[in-house]
Image (cartoon, rainbow, N blue to C red):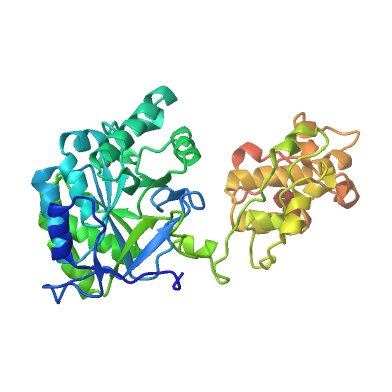
């Protein structure tokens, strides 16, 4: 990761001159920011391969860019719109900051010069659809395909060198859908969400935009900030955001796509997680159950007690199972009735911990009913007993108390009125004491 990282600073005035003289010329890099000794600058360039990490941004996805603590990636959507985009561009140039812009095809069509300026200044340019519809989450393929392609075609058409277009796409309004993502990924395009927005598209003050940007960044410690270069409030907030980023020790990272002669920055999978799991953070996950399990009528997924995150003062946290154990558990045969046996004392524990009183009563009924049925053989058996007994242990009959309370013995303080005549454990213990 560090080895292939390139520390870059852009000689902004040179880039501007080059942009005017030879549009699309490669940016000139230097180790300083001429004329701006206090500039925030760009600390490094991160090269990413969209095929290896196709969805990024923790607002919606599991993975995000492999940033270190206090590293920020600035992104701007919906431009270029000369009135505001040019001001944003100037501020970034003055600070030698490299950002990523997600262009709307319609804007590129109306203002191709704005796209060329971004490329000339060395920023990364991705796309953001043709017309920015906020219906990507419910569009059929025949609608979203031309939206995606139209944006790409008009943005690359605006460039002197279309190969400068990054295979990065942000879905308008972040209205993600599986089909849209799969389509983009099949074309080698990386789907960019974000790690935090600053709500600069809402009717809020520029001060609020600044506050939200910093607060949300501080909360995560690093990440992708989503902004818009078509808003007056963003233009007004950006100098304060940049000033605060510098004061708080944040560093700007420039992201570019991998190419044949520019390999991806080496990373490990865990670096693509915003907060990698640690040994001290307990996580309960259900075992992954392959679909084919359900084609076998004699097998069912069989999660173990440990998967339920069950813990009490009587039950120490069980060690996590290995991958091999999980695979075995996911294809176990149908469990026998004795699997549902509730050990002595467990009902009371359940009553006092996780279950509602009503649910606990049902548990008690399931555990006690066969015993009641056995003890009451030849006597009056409740009509509902056989129905609930199917989940009860087969061997539980051996432990059935001899003097199961038949009716009307449950104390008012511990049993609901509706179950007062049922043979619950509570009723039995009270009868014994009596
Ligand atoms: Zn947008």
In which quarter of the view is residue 241 placed? bottom left
Q: Say above or below: 432 vs 202.
A: below
* Residue plotted at (27% across, 37% down): 157
> Does residue 272 appear in the picture of this structure?
yes
Q: Nearer the viewer, residue 429 or 326?
A: 326
Residue 37, given in percent of the width and then of the height, sits at 14, 77
Q: Which quadrant of the figure contains the C terminus? A: bottom right
Residue 247, given in percent of the width and then of the height, sits at 20, 75
Q: Residue furthest front?
A: 22
Q: Nearer the viewer, residue 338 or 162?
A: 162
Residue 385, given in percent of the width and then of the height, sits at 77, 34
In which quarter of the view is residue 26 placed? bottom left
Q: In the displayed structure, does residue 232 sit left or right of residue 202? A: left
Residue 9, given in percent of the width and then of the height, sits at 25, 69
Q: Say above or below: 390 vs 328.
A: above
> Does residue 276 appear in the picture of this structure?
no
Quadrant where ligand 1 appears: top left
Q: In the displayed structure, does residue 407 sit left or right of residue 14? A: right
How many marks on residues?
Answer: 0
Q: Nearer the viewer, residue 283 or 407?
A: 283
* Residue plotted at (20% across, 43% down): 79
Q: Say above or below: 6 vs 293.
A: below
């Amino acid at each position: 990761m560090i080895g292939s990282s390139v520390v870059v600073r852009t000689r902004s005035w040179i880039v501007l001159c080059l942009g005017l003289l030879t549009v699309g010329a490669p940016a000139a890099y230097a180790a300083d920011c001429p004329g701006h000794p206090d500039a925030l600058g760009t600390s490094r360039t991160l090269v990413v391969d969209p095929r290896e990490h196709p969805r990024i941004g923790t607002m919606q996805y599991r993975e995000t860019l492999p940033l270190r603590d206090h590293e920020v990636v600035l992104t701007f959507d919906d431009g270029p719109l000369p009135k505001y985009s040019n001001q944003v561009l100037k501020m970034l140039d003055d600070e030698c900051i490299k950002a990523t812009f997600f262009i709307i095809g319609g804007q590129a069509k109306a203002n191709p010069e704005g796209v060329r300026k971004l490329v000339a200044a060395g920023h990364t340019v991705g796309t953001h659809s043709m017309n920015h519809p906020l219906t990507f989450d419910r569009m059929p393929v025949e609608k979203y395909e031309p939206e995606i392609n139209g944006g790409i075609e008009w943005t690359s058409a605006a460039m002197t060198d279309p190969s400068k277009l990054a295979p990065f796409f942000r879905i308008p309004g972040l209205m993600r859908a599986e089909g849209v993502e799969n389509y983009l990924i099949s074309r080698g395009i990386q789907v960019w969400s974000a790690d935090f927005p600053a709500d600069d598209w809402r009717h809020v003050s520029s001060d609020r935009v600044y506050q939200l940007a910093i607060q949300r960044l501080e909360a995560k410690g690093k990440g992708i900030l989503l902004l818009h270069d078509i808003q007056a409030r963003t233009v007004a907030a950006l100098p304060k955001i940049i000033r605060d980023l510098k004061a708080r020790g944040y560093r700007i990272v420039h992201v570019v796509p991998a190419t044949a002669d520019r390999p991806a920055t080496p990373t490990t999978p865990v670096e693509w997680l915003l907060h990698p799991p640690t040994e001290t953070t307990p996580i309960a996950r259900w075992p992954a159950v392959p679909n084919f399990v359900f084609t076998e009528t004699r097998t069912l997924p069989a999660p173990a007690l440990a998967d339920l995150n069950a813990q009490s003062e009587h039950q120490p946290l069980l060690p996590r199972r290995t991958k091999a154990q999980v695979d075995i558990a996911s294809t176990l045969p149908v469990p026998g009735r004795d699997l549902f046996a509730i050990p002595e004392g467990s009902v009371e524990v359940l009553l006092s911990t996780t279950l509602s009183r009503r649910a606990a009563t049902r548990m008690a009924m399931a555990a006690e009913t066969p015993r009641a049925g056995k003890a009451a053989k030849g006597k009056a058996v409740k009509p509902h007993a056989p129905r609930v007994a199917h989940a009860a242990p087969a061997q539980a009959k051996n432990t059935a108390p001899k003097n199961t309370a038949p009716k009307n013995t449950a104390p008012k303080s511990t049993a609901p009125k509706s179950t007062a005549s049922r043979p619950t454990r509570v009723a039995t213990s009270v009868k014994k004491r009596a």
